[in-house]
Amino acid sequence: MIRLYFHIRQGDRLSKDPEGAEFNDLETARAEAVRSARELLSQRVLNGEEIDGQAFELTSEDGAVVDTVRFRDVLRLHEE
């Protein structure tokens, strides 16, 4: 198990996740980050807010960024 924090980066600003969550592996954490980003984006679209420029920084307990999930990359415009 690994504990990762989903900090939200927007430009120079960083909103820190104070609790983090435990995952079996990085792949599982990344899938959760994609799902969470889609959920946040859907609420922002409904509220007429900006939806570009943010990303989750998946950070380990020692503060190292182990992956980044840009919100705009999780939008699925169509299935092929």
Image (spheres, grey):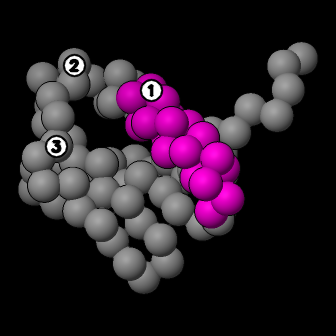
Residue of label 1: 31
Amino acid type of the residue tagged 2 in the rendering: Asn
Q: Quadrant of residue 31?
A: top left
Q: Distance between the Cα atoms at labels 3 and 1?
A: 15 Å
Residue of label 3: 20
Q: Residues within 10 Å of mark 2 (few under 14, many from 20)?
A: few
Is residue 10 or residue 64 the one in the foreground? 10
Q: Is residue 37 magenta?
A: yes
At 41% from the left and 66% from the top, the residue drawn is 9
Q: Are marks 1 and 2 in contact (CB under 8 Å)?
A: no
Which of the two discs, 2 and 3, sits closer to the camera?
3
Q: Is residue 76 visible?
A: yes
Is residue 64 or residue 71 the one in the foreground? 71
Region rendered in magenta: 31-49
Amino acid type of the residue tagged 1 in the rendering: Ala
User: Secondary structure beneath disc 2?
Assistant: loop
Residue of label 2: 24
- Left or right of residue 63: residue 25: right
Amino acid type of the residue tagged 3 in the rendering: Gly
> In the rendered structure, which disc, 1 or 2, sits on the residue that comes first in sequence?
2
User: Secondary structure beneath disc 1?
Assistant: helix
- Left or right of residue 52: residue 56: left
Q: Is residue 64 visible?
A: no
> In the rendered structure, which disc, 3 or 1, sits on the residue that comes first in sequence?
3
